[in-house]
Image (cartoon, helix red, strand yellow):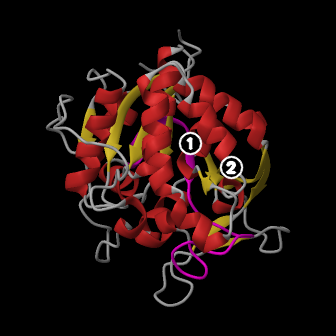
Amino acid sequence: MSNIPQIIIDTDPGQDDAAAILMALGLDKLNEIKLLALTCVAGNVPLHYTQKNARIICDWAQRSDIPVYAGAKKPLLKPLFTAEEVHGKTGLDGTKLHEPNTVLQEKNAAIFLAETLANASKNSITLCPIGPLTNLALAFSLNPQCIQGIKEIVIMGGTFFEAGNVTPNADFNFFVDPVAAQIVLQSGANIRIVPLDVTHKACITNERMEALRQLPNQNGKRFADILQSYERFDIQQFGLEGGPLHDPCAIAAAIRPEFFNQKSLYVEVDTSSGICEGATALDWHGKSGKTPNALWCYHIDDKSFFDYFTHAISALP
């Protein structure tokens, strides 16, 4: 049991967040990870919806035992920017939603993170933030010592070789709260970044969608329905053959890093306002002389990833 990765997902569900959470819940059922908690942040949609969606997703997997915490309602220094045009008003377009049975914990997500990490064994917990990084930045501010409990932070965010998906140069997660992203990158924790460069190679083709739909469980079909609604946006914007599964790539990178090509380098996020707000600056060739602070994923074995993703979803009810 002690060798099973312990994971906390920080999330703003969102359809591809739903995919990542369901993947993690499937891997938990298969005893490949231990999912400790979901912490929710405003991002794709406001916090009222993200925390509710996280609880609904736990219900879908019949896992109302997973603790869900609500955190930041807005970024550290700027107004909230959301993505209803992609994910729909509730964040989970494409399927019928119910009032969740999974309860919302009373404690604030940032306080939960600060306390849990501070009290954890050294280097024992992997954080998978797949939304804006506000909750993590607040936790580190509340108790800088809490970083001791982090084994690794696997971030879905950033872009370098691909165009931005919300501005010319920035991905959504870093753009929503660039100050928080920069705080996390400068924290000294072990960081792995899964950017759009990778996630745009992990597209849900019709064949892969059908494989999910054919699984002998409720969640395979439900998830295919959600993806059908979601994928049209990135297909139209980027000309991809299917919608990219951004957030599940971060779960895969935390458990199966061998699916990815990676490079150790220095990364920072532009916190100025203007055309580069939220953009990731990468020292690809080591010209700055600054010590690398992240492992940057730049390629994915998409077949192995989708086989693993389907394996996880197949374990759900």
Q: Determine which quarter of the picture holds residue 186.
A: bottom right
Does residue 8 appear in this view?
Answer: no
Say if mark 1 contacts mark 2, CB within 8 Å.
yes
Task: Estimate the x, y position of residue 1 in percent, counting from the top left.
Answer: 53, 9
Q: Nearer the viewer, residue 260 or 95?
A: 95
Q: Residue at x 21, y 29 (%)?
A: 102
Say whether residue 168 is magenta: yes
Find numbered disc 2 in the image and state the secondary structure of the residue it sits on. loop
- Label 1 or label 2, whichever comes before in sequence order: 2
User: Which residue in the protein does label 2 denote?
Assistant: 202
Say above or below: 26 vs 145.
above
Q: Residue furthest bottom?
A: 274
Residue 10: image location, x then y, percent: 40, 45
Amino acid, disc 2 = Ala
Relative to the observer, which residue lies in front, 146 or 302? 302
Residue under numbered circle 1? 248
The residue segment tinted magenta is 144-170
Q: Quadrant of residue 208?
A: top right
Circle 2 packing at 10 Å, graded few (<14), some (14-19), many (20+), is many
Q: Cα distance, mark 1 to mark 2?
A: 9 Å
Secondary structure of residue under mark 1:
helix
